[in-house]
Image: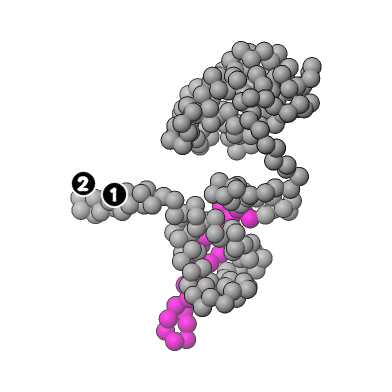
Amino acid sequence: MDNKSDEEACVFAFQLAAGSVLPMALYTAIELDLLELIKKAGPEASASASELAAQHPTTNPDAADMIDSILRLLASHSVLICSLKQLADGGVERRYSLAPVCKFLTRNEDGVSVGPLCLLLQDNITWVRVEHVSGDMFVSMTKADAIFMKWVCHGWRDSHCEKLLKNCYEALPENGKVIIAEVIVPDNPNGGQSSSWAAQGDMTMLAYTSGGGKERSEREFEALAKIVGFKQLIKVCSAYSNWIMEFHK
């Protein structure tokens, strides 16, 4: 390894060590609506940090510099596109426009984006029409015609999932169902981006959970459904590597 490659590898190692900085910067940009403000300026428009700071009710004299630091980091990771504008005094001004990924980080015509997920992963937030019910799902479940669980099973080993699903089964009426949203791991890992995302999620569960969490294959989900007593598992649809499955009683 030559000196340049060695130096790049060292810098990359430091980036990995400080890996939480990027998601927190994105969190702040979304919370401050910075991406939406740039989008509002127009399809080909750009904005400077000072222009964005002026649209916020802040008296902090360093606000523009703080925002510029956030946007510069996002631009370095291709979340934004940075261009330089020559100023009359000989200086330069950084201007930022949206990169292609911002199509999914800003609200579409239906008011939906991946932005709230970025907030959810970094903080606990409230959600419209969602009521938080206290209790222990490993003890009992509230009676319901259908029970929806999103990204729950992947946080637990099989024995815990069996207990959880058994409680769901007992809370359901005849012909009730559990609706599960989870990543399905393909048997062959050589399947492109979806396969890589599933494998990365599996490693995340390995690192973040103490309960034996993991992503599962279709056959593993079928085994869970069968051992609990569900009649069948139906794969309903998928989007961006996430599957909606139904366990029918």
Element under disc 2: loop
Residue 58: horizontal and vertical position, in percent?
59, 74
Relative to 69, does residue 192 appear above or below in the rendering? above
Classify residue 161 by image quadrant: top right
**Can you tell which quarter of the image residue 142 is in?**
top right
The answer to whether mark 2 and mark 1 are in CB contact below 8 A is yes
- From the viewer's perspective, is residue 193 above or below residue 15? above
Q: Which residue occupies the foreground of this view, 121 or 167?
A: 167
Q: Position of residue 216 (x, y in %)?
A: 53, 25
**In front here: 124 or 93?**
124
Q: Residue 1: give its label.
A: 2
Q: Quadrant of the C terminus?
A: top right
Is 144 contained in the magenta span?
no
Query: Over which residues does the magenta segment extend?
Result: 79-106
Name the mark on residue 9.
1
| Residue 235 in view, yes or no | no
Q: Residue at x 48, y 72 (%)?
A: 65
For image coordinates 61% across by 12% down, the residue present is 227
Q: Is residue 14 left or right of residue 91?
A: left
How is colour applied across the structure in the image? Answer: one colour
Residue type indicated by callout 1: Ala
Tell me the CA gap for discs 2 and 1: 10 Å
Which is more toward the observer, 136 or 205? Answer: 136
Which residue is situated farthest in the bottom direction here?
89
Amino acid at the residue labelled 2: Met
Q: How many numbered circles does the render carry?
A: 2
Q: Position of residue 117 (x, y in %)?
A: 60, 47
Q: Which mark is residue 123?
A: none
